[in-house]
Image: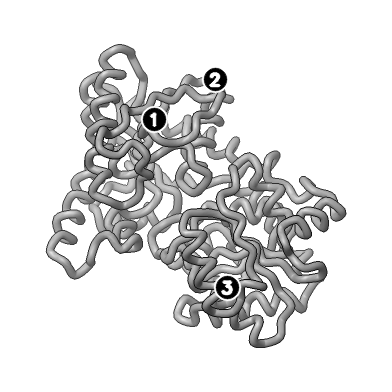
Amino acid sequence: MIAPTSFFLDYGCHVRILEEARVLQKMGHRVTLLTYYLGRDLPDLEIIRTRPTPWRADYEVGSSLHKFAFDVFLGWEGLKTILRRRFDLVHGHLHEGALIGYFLSRLQRIPLLADFQGSLTGEMVDHNFLDPGGRWYRWIRLLELRISQMPDVIVTSTQRAAYMLEREFNCSDWRVYPLPDCVNLDFFRPDVLTPKEVAIRRRALGVPEGRFVIAYLGLLADYQGTPLLVQAARLLKQCGVDAHFLVMGFPGVAHYAQMARDLDVADRITFTGKVPYEQAPEHLALGDVAIAPKISATEGAGKILNYMAMGLPTVTFDTPVNREYLGSLGVYARRRDGAVGLADAILSLLHAPEWREELGKKLRARADRHFSWERSGRQLLNIYQKVLHKT
């Protein structure tokens, strides 16, 4: 596996990479993971890291020009690895992983599987790194088109991403397989804390007793909808609603905490900072409901599956990707309504405890039925076998 990111960090695409590797190992396969020099080592995975860049060893990767250098280092480490050992298949995560993986797979004449979690250009636009009206947009879009033609087979984290590859990037439907994000149901479960433990931990985090708690766990960023979350807190406070937001994640904690102070809702939001993945279930158990205000139209939202497994009714925007996860069980706001729509959706749950309980049970059952990693692992192995047989 090639992971062009600082694996392992406690969010998003890292969780998909981790859980795919773990389920493959559980089914008896050996996985070697190539990644950047930063990140957290995990005891049950073979991880090979690049050397640090000499000019800034502590740099955390995002959308930036530094990433080109990191990918060159990753390609070089991959070349050394693949010349020393024999592999059956290269599994390239994200578009950069697919590009690097193409050349490595051809050296050993083995198949390349690309694992896409959205659109390369779409993500760069969402991160404000690429201007859709600028001169570079066309060239990056052409690069994405070329990368999409390289793999022997592609898996996508959503049905929408698969459809986009077929319609916009001319990928044959027999090469593209939707392989949805999934959730570890033994790890994420509603009973990880007792009611007494929930009360104690809420109090320790400064959540006033008796407040209705809305939980968020993930990256903090504008494209993730963090400003809308803060604005929704202000609207609820103005309406006299006794609700509290528990915002768990990173980076930009100081920035968004200042935004909360500026909007006079610092007393309604607790920012915990980074939460290790191993502690995610017990932190999510502190919420009465969950929120996923991401505004991206192309990326997945794996955090929703964690919410579902925890039995948390989930407020989110009405997008095709979110409906893939939640179906008719989501509490949806229209994207154009922004923070107002989120606040209204939260209010509808606050006043309906029986509906919340029913939704939570049905969401857990839906996650079990459609989004277990064991089921996904079997699908992934079938795809491996098909592409190995063809080559």
Q: In which image quadrant can residue 257 be found?
A: bottom right
Q: Which one is in front, 332 or 201?
A: 201
Q: In which image quadrant can residue 161 be found?
A: bottom left
The residue tagged with tag 2: helix, strand or loop?
A: loop
Quarter of the image with the N terminus is top left
Relative placement, left or right, of 236 versus 50 is: right
How far apart, in angstroms, are the residues tagged by discs 3 and 1? 36 Å
Inspect the image, locate mark 2, and give the three-letter code of the amino acid beneath it. Gly
The residue tagged with tag 1: helix, strand or loop?
A: loop
Residue under numbered circle 2 = 28
Structural crowding at the residue carrying mark 3, measured as other residues with C-alpha within 10 Å and reported as few (<14), some (14–19) or many (≥20) = many
Q: How far across and how far down the image is residue 188, in percent?
A: 68, 45
Circles 3, 1 touching at the beta carbon (< 8 Å): no
How far apart, in angstroms, are the residues tagged by discs 2 and 3? 41 Å
Of the two numbered discs 3 and 1 on the same chain, state the one appearing first in sequence.
1
Residue drawn at 24 percent across, 61 percent down? 130
Relative placement, left or right, of 283 versus 89 is: right
Inspect the image, locate mark 1, and give the three-letter code of the amino acid beneath it. Met
> Which is closer to the viewer, label 1 or label 2?
1
Say which mark, if any, is on residue 332: 3
The residue tagged with tag 3: helix, strand or loop?
A: strand
